[in-house]
Image (spheres, rainbow, N blue to C red):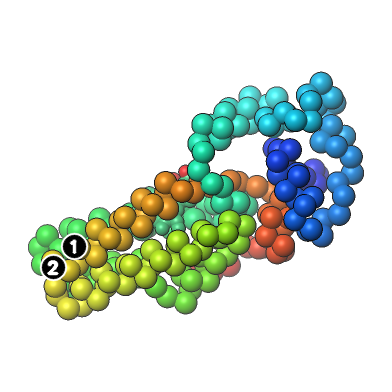
Amino acid sequence: MSVRHASHLSTTMLVAALFSGCQVGSPPGAPAATSPSAASAPTTAPSPPTSHPTLVALGSLDALDSRKPVPLIPMMAHHQKQNMRDHLLAVQEIVTALAVDDFAAAEKAAVRIASSDQMAQMCTHMGAGAPGFTDQALAFHKTADGVLAAAKAKDKKAALQTLGATLATCTACHDAWKQEVVDDATWQAKTQQAPPEHGGHH
Ligand code: HEC
């Protein structure tokens, strides 16, 4: 709140923000304006304009990870990871149920990863600053619909096949994207949307 632009705003992001025609207006001065220590850092430095050890370590991690960023404010990043852990739990429950031909339990778990209006709304929200992310997310849920249909049909072979196809959409997405935790102002600049104020839908 006190710092208008994220302290980790890189030159690339700044340039992108300036050229994307967002309504943020011109930032008051270069990144050096608010930080005396940034005076010695050339504006071309890709690293964060801060020397806090934790942020430097996070910057190093980010530099090692070449996946595309999905910008999310902390609350959304947390929410996304909660969803992800539940996706994995659903897969666990489906496999366990199929092993003992418990199709009702498999169906119940499959519902949690299958398509729904609420799921589509959430995926659209999560991908607002990452073109392509939402399409991949919706394709995942669509593939998971096949698991649900197979469980309903009590077709174990089809359930396992569609579950394999679903897991391939999980791993493809994980190969392509990483979370990028940003502040409200950065989220707004990247999505042209007002930041969500609370948890919203679950
Ligand atoms: C549309 C993209 C997408 C799909 C599809 C997807 N995930 Fe993820 N998942 C992510 C992202 C992004 C992260 C955060 C990765 C990062 O920042 O390192 C993540 C993280 C995770 C995590 C780590 C959670 C944590 O607490 O750190 C788990 C577990 C996970 N996903 C499971 C799954 C499973 C299981 C599926 C499929 C059934 C799945 N995901 C499908 C995008 C996706």
Locate residue 181 relative to residue 168 in the image: left or right.
right
Asked if residue 190 lies left or right of residue 83, the reply is right
Name the secondary structure under disc 2. helix
| Residue found farthest to the front | 19
Label 2 vs label 1: CA separation? 6 Å
Q: Circle 2 sits on which residue?
A: 156
Q: Is residue 25 in view? A: yes
Q: Quadrant of residue 191?
A: bottom right
Taking the image as shown, residue 193 lies to the left or right of residue 167, namely: right
Compared with 94, 77 (above or below) is above
Residue at the top extreme of this rendering: 40
In percent of width and height, residue 62 lies at: 56, 35
Please identify the quarter of the rendering in which residue 151 is found.
bottom left
Which dot marks residue 18?
Answer: none
Q: Secondary structure at mark 1?
A: helix
Give residue 120's position: percent from left, percent from top: 48, 71
Which residue carries the number 1 mark? 160
Kindly identify the residue that appears in the image at 42 percent across and 53 percent down: 173
Which amino acid type is shown beneath numbered disc 2? Lys
